Image: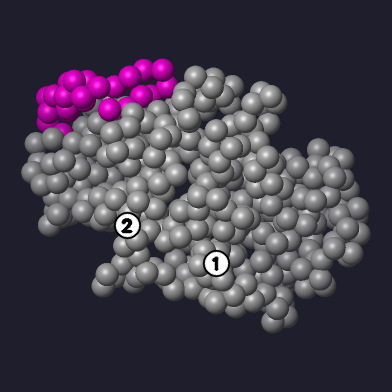
Amino acid sequence: MFHVDDESFTAAWLAQAESAFHSSGVLAGGPGTRLAACLDDPALLLSLCLHCKREGKSFFPLPPGSPFEAAVRQAKRGGCHALIHKSSDSVTPLTGAVQDAEGCLIQTSSGTTGEPKVITRSWASIDREIAGYTKAFAASADMTPLIACPVNHSYGLISGVLSAIEQGKRPIVIHNLNPKYIIRKMMETERPLLYASPVLIHTVSLLYPRDRKLHAVMTSGTNMRLPLFEHLKERATFVFQQYGCSEAGCISVSENPSDPSDIGVALPHFRIGAGDSEHNPVEIVVHDGAETIRTRDLGYISSSGSLRLVSRIDDMINVAGVNVYPVEVENVILEYQGIEDAVVFKRENALGHTQVWLRYVSGGKVTPEQLRQWCSTELTPHQRPFRIEEVDAIKRMANGKINRRALAQEEPEKVSP
């Protein structure tokens, strides 16, 4: 069925795990019962997920390591009948539960633009996504997925694990995220396809033997910076990108992206609305039959028919009526020698005027004044940062995304004069 690190989990093991869950009473409910699970062991989490999917129950995978009280709050917020916490025999019944007409996968949005929302998707819609994903991503047919990202999120769970199992593959879930271990697993796996965040893939690529290429890498969830994209194009035989949202799952796949904005062709069951050129990006809207999903992302359809991602609507910075897209500024900043990382975000001053702010990492090699001079020659006036801060590290969420909204609300750090 699947591997976790160096251990193999078969159908017989899954039957034993299911028996243990039955003994604890957690599986007593019928179809439509909502179960939440906070399990550090990804094998146990996947066994419970596969049971719920097969039996028509609803499943809410919570982030591993959540304290008990926090997990209870999340499970109640998700309308669950019970919470399994840490082990198969630790079951807490909950009140105020929701009985679903059909089983579903329960997840929450990333929360980068506000309070995370509880989102439900029927198992039938998950199956439709898997079928569309397999068809749109034919280039991966002979590859073995190595999932080095959380399997409680759609990217790792559906695109990585469930899609592979449906195709008869034995995906490898990487629980040990030490880059050297990931490299060993990649080198001993035939035609490995690494699912991970851009940050982790970058680290692995830097440590990978210089005389060998990574076979294939897949990224999702955020605009990859141009320097990293160009680096991966040199270090990997195949570089893939996919794009999606919590409400729809995977929306598009790019099997040979030409640049970081190229997020490919929509899965066959979707119809996509977006802008008509890079000069006219509009909100990407996904039509799935009678359902319309607004992504809050700006994008456009290129002349080649590929969907292009420009920015989150909430991340866009309007400076005196001119739109500034953070990733465009970040790519310029990252060209400066010595800059290791950078993030651009918006703040409002006391008069309510929106300003561009920049935080960067250089280990003390680059001063704010040097960057300010660089920006004066490389950026248009409305793109130039009003404030520049050097920091020790750029904060990222577990999925590799940057919460620019949270940065805008933080106290300034080492602000340049």
Dots 2 and 1: beta carbons under 8 Å? no
Which amino acid type corresponds to the residue marked 1 in the rendered image?
A: Ser
- Read off the magenta span: 1-26
The secondary element bearing badge 2 is classed as strand
Q: How many marks?
A: 2
Against 311, is 319 above or below?
Answer: below
The answer to whether 190 appears left or right of 18 in the picture is right
Percent position (x, y) of residue 185?
A: 50, 22
Other residues around mark 1 within 10 Å, as few (<14) / some (14–19) / many (≥20): few
Residue bearing the label numbered 2: 119
Please tell me which residue is depicted at 53% across the width and 75% down the height of the picture.
275
Q: Nearer the viewer, mark 2 or mark 1?
A: 1
Please tell me which residue is depicted at 27% across the width and 39% down the height of the picture.
166
Against 241, is 345 above or below?
Answer: below
Q: Nearer the viewer, residue 322 or 369?
A: 322
The image quadrant of residue 290 is: bottom left
Against 404, is 188 above or below?
Answer: above
Please tell me which residue is depicted at 33% across the width and 29% down the height of the picture.
170
The numbered mark at residue 339 is none
The secondary element bearing badge 1 is classed as loop
Q: Which mark sits nearer the N-terminus, 2 or 1? A: 2
**Split into 4 quadrants, where in the image is the N terminus?**
top left
**Split into 4 quadrants, where in the image is the C terminus?**
bottom right
Please tell me which residue is depicted at 79% across the width and 63% down the height of the picture.
385
Q: Residue 243 lies in magenta, yes or no?
A: no
Q: Is residue 103 visible?
A: yes
Residue placed furthest toward the bottom: 321
Residue bearing the label numbered 1: 304
Q: Nearer the viewer, residue 132 or 51?
A: 132
CA–CA distance in space, label 2 to label 1:
33 Å
Q: Residue 12 lies in magenta, yes or no?
A: yes
Image coloring type: one colour
